[in-house]
Amino acid sequence: MKPVKVFLLLFFISWQGIAQQKLLEEAFIRASNEGFSGVVLVADQGKILFEKASGMRSYESNTPLQKDDIFEMASVSKQFTAMMIMLCKEKGLLDFDDPVSDYLEIPYKGISIRHLLTHTSGLPDYQAIMDEHWDKSKVAGNPDILEYLRIYAPPILFKPGERYEYSNTGYVLLGSIVEKVSGKDFVVLSKEWIFEPLGMKNTAIRSLDEKSKVRNFAAGHLKDENGNYVNANRFRASDYTLWLGNRKGPGRVSSTAQDLLKWDQALYTNKLISPKTLEEAFSPYRLKDGTRSYYGFGWDLEPKSPFGKMVKHNGDNPGYQTIIVRFIEENKTIIILNNNVHPAMMRLVEAATLSFGRK
């Protein structure tokens, strides 16, 4: 190719990249002007292309948010719980198709560990039972949840494997199974098996007291009756993260956008588990009627995105919204952490996807 043509081609590619980046910049500025509070990180091949923070770590103290602030992950935590189960599998402590009743005393039969991982167990919602019967001045953990399931034994929603229905209850059971087979505390073991090996220094499963002592912990915010943002912890009765504050499995991981990128990149390596085991996490589950459910082990699956196979998960706690999107065939990543439940979040995901250009 002639030098002039090469120059023009490189110029066009550079200009196109700048134009695509501008789309995300403009979307971020618009969201910030509309009151979005959070961190947006976009990476390609592990290299950060865009990383900015907007809004407040704490509205009540008027403290600006920083890029390295720590957020509640909410249900993004489920991918870490699933990884703990996969690690147990590779250590020979369990098999995915083992009956849950081999490990835990529950009033339900025919449920396997795989059913829990893929949200196809049919288990009833533990939060509804705890909300109705638990003394919210106390803090519940997994043993309390299991006890209340045994006491009240709400009926199963459908036979295991018949359909997909998102189940926080299933991930509570997974956390308890990890403790049962390992003989260790789930919180301690998550740090030992995942967070420390990957250098995720700002990531942990923190108690309410521990979170209060972290200087750069971004508080979750909700609007009060006057339309002002206040700490979501003020709404104790409706904030299950307080009175279910010791649960393990469905949530409670807190982290930063940069630590999540370390996690994302580690999943392209053999640092934690074998590619064969990880592939199960990214594979759909075949229901009893032969149709596929596109939820793997802690990940929503999309086989045909603009950049090939995509895996993602979002989280939603009082005051928080989180999402991680991974285009695993192209090694492109979007991470958005929001601490005021702002409606601009999905627009930012769309703008971030467009910023990658076309495949």
Image (tube, rainbow, N blue to C red):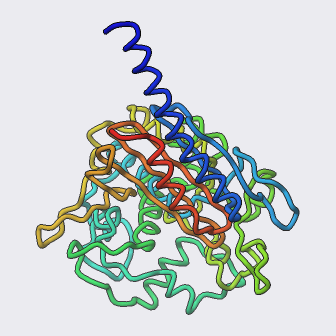
Instruction: Pick out the residue farthest to the left.
Output: 290
Comparing 69 with 332, the one in front is 332
Work out whether 311 lies above or below 34.
above
Give the residue displayed 53% in from the left and 42% down from the top.
42
Comparing 249 with 95, the one in front is 249
Counting from the top left corner in percent of width and height, residue 225 is at 76, 86
State the image quarter where residue 96 is shown: bottom left
Work out whether 148 lies above or below 82.
below
Give the residue displayed 67% in from the left and 74% down from the top.
242
Work out whether 174 lies above or below 159.
above
State the image quarter where residue 289 is shown: bottom left
Counting from the top left corner in percent of width and height, residue 209 is at 76, 63
Give the residue displayed 42% in from the left and 68% down from the top.
173
Comparing 208 with 226, the one in front is 226
Comparing 19 with 79, the one in front is 19
Counting from the top left corner in percent of width and height, residue 155 is at 34, 90
Q: Identify the image quadrant of the N terminus.
A: top left
